[in-house]
Image (cartoon, rainbow, N blue to C red):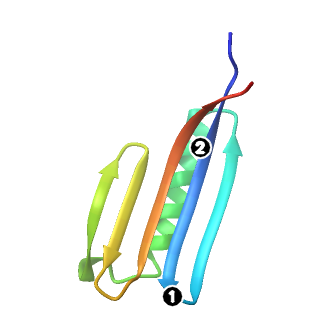
Amino acid sequence: MKQKVFLVYVLIEYSAESTTDAHYVYSSLEKAHEAMCREIDEARGNFYIEGGEFITRTERGQEWCNDDGQSYSIGIEELDVL
C-alpha cells in the first residue's frame, strides 16, 4: 500500500514586489485541512474580500483576486510517497 502525504500550498501576492510562497507537508488529510483553513483565515485578514472575487472555492482549496493584482491561492494536494 502506498503511503500518502498532503501538501498545503500557500501563494499570496500583496503586490508585484511582495509575495509569500510556502509549502507544508502533513501526514493526514484532517491535519492538512485544519492548516489550510488557518492559512485562508490569515490571508483573508490581509485583504478587503468584498473588493475582489473568488476564482475557486472547494473543499481542498480557495483562490481569490482583485483588480489591484492582490491575490491568494491556498489548497491541498495529495501526493504518493515513492
Q: Residue at x 54, y 41 (%)?
A: 77
**Label at residue 16:** 1
Q: Is residue 17 above or below residue 13?
A: below
The amino acid type of the residue labelled 2 equals Ala
- Of the two numbered discs 2 and 1 in the rendering, the one whose residue sits closer to the viewer: 1
> What x and y, as percent, mark residue 33?
53, 44
Front-most of residues 75 and 41: 75
Q: Residue at x 49, y 51 (%)?
A: 75
Q: Secondary structure at mark 2?
A: helix
> In which quadrant of the rendered view does residue 72 lie?
bottom left
Q: Secondary structure at mark 1?
A: loop
**Label at residue 32:** 2
The amino acid type of the residue labelled 1 equals Ala
**Label at residue 59:** none
Q: Residue at x 52, y 72 (%)?
A: 12
Q: Quadrant of the N terminus?
A: top right
Q: Is residue 44 above or below residue 33?
A: below
Q: Residue at x 28, y 85 (%)?
A: 67
Front-most of residues 1 and 29: 1
